[in-house]
Each structure stands twice: as structure tokens, then as C-alpha cells.
Image: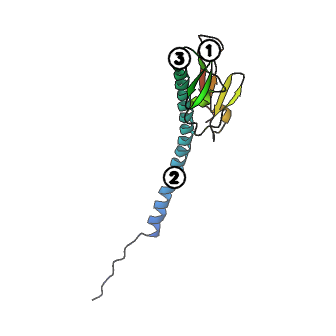
């Protein structure tokens, strides 16, 4: 009487089919992960815009409560004010965290925060324009088309 041994494992065809299916799934998944990175950079730019808005409003509130002085203490720094809001030179000092952004470039009363690692850095940014006259708020905007 002859005993047959039962072998276990996968055949070569089964392995090829599984590897092909994994390759197809990876082809669809990789572009989605790349898109998530872009979306994450855009979200961080929009979050910084909100932080700058909050910091400017907080500085304005502190200035009003203090009788509208020329400067206020914030985050351990003395913040110079123009028309009750932080100057473009000082707005970064009102923020606790600038992770992912370098120091802003400042020119003519406009501070520009650019997102590190952006595909087009000039189109992945937050700008803060200090108020030009009393009674006007600062202009704060973000651009995320190049993130």
C-alpha cells in the first residue's frame, strides 16, 4: 500500500497572480499618498493663516485693554504695534510654533510665510499685511495652489 504525502504551499501560478494584484493595487495607492502630502501642506498653510489671524486679534485685544500702547508683551517678546495690530516685522514673534515654515520675509509692511517642501513655494504661503490706517484690520491671506 502506497501512501501519498500531501504537500502544502502555493503554486507558481498562484504566487504570480497575487504579485500582479499587489502591483495593481500599489499603482492606484501611490498617487493617492502623494496627493495626501500635498493636501497636508495646504492644510498646514491654512492652519498658519488661522494662527496669524488669532495672534493679530489677541494682540489687538491686549492693546485695547492696555489703553492702545505702542507695544505689548506676548509670548515672552515685546511686540511693536501699528494702529493697534502687530507690525509685519513682529507678527512672527506672536506665534508659538512655525514648524514647517521658515522665518517670514518682510518688505513694505508685508510678512510672507512660505511652506517648506512645497512644489511651488511662491504659491504655498501666508501673507500678513499690517494695517495702513487707524481703524483698519490687517490683511491676512493664504495661497495653496502650489502646495
Q: Position of residue 85 (x, y in %)?
A: 59, 19
Q: Quadrant of residue 78?
A: top right
- Which quadrant, please, contains the N terminus? bottom left
Res 51 label: none
Res 83 label: 1
Q: Quadrant of residue 123?
A: top right
* C-alpha distance separating marks 2 and 3: 59 Å
Mark closest to the chain's N terminus, 1 or 2: 2
Residue at x 59%, y 16% (from the top left corner): 69
Mark closest to the chain's N terminus, 1 or 3: 3
* C-alpha distance separating marks 1 and 3: 14 Å
Along the viewing direction, whichever of 14 and 52 lies nearer the viewer: 52
Res 66 label: 3
Q: Which residue is mark 2?
A: 26
Image height of 74 relative to 85, above or below: below
Mark closest to the chain's N terminus, 2 or 3: 2
Q: Is residue 143 visible?
A: no
Query: Which-is-in-front pick, marks 1 and 2?
Result: 1
Count neighbours of disc 3 (C-alpha within 10 A) and say few if under 14, some if 14 to 19, many if 20 or more.
few
Image height of 130 relative to 21, above or below: above
Q: Is residue 68 visible?
A: yes
* C-alpha distance separating marks 1 and 2: 55 Å
Element at badge 2?
A: helix
Query: Which-is-in-front pick, marks 2 and 3?
Result: 3
Residue at x 49%, y 51% (from the top left corner): 25
- Which quadrant, please, contains the C terminus? top right
Amino acid at each position: 500500500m502506497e501512501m501519498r504525502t500531501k504537500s502544502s504551499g502555493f503554486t507558481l501560478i498562484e504566487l504570480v497572480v497575487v504579485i500582479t494584484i499587489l502591483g495593481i493595487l500599489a499603482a492606484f495607492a501611490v498617487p493617492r499618498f502623494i496627493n495626501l502630502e500635498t493636501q497636508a501642506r495646504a492644510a498646514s498653510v491654512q492652519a498658519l493663516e488661522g494662527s496669524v489671524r488669532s495672534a493679530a486679534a489677541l494682540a489687538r485685544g491686549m492693546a485695547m485693554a492696555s489703553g492702545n500702547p505702542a507695544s505689548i508683551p506676548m509670548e515672552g517678546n515685546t511686540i511693536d504695534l501699528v494702529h493697534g495690530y502687530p507690525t509685519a516685522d513682529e507678527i512672527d514673534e506672536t506665534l508659538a510654533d512655525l514648524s514647517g515654515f521658515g522665518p517670514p520675509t518682510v518688505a513694505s509692511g508685508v510678512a510672507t510665510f512660505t511652506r517648506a517642501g512645497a512644489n511651488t513655494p511662491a504659491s504655498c504661503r501666508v501673507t500678513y499685511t499690517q494695517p495702513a490706517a487707524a481703524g483698519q484690520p490687517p490683511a491676512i491671506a493664504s495661497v495653496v495652489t502650489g502646495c
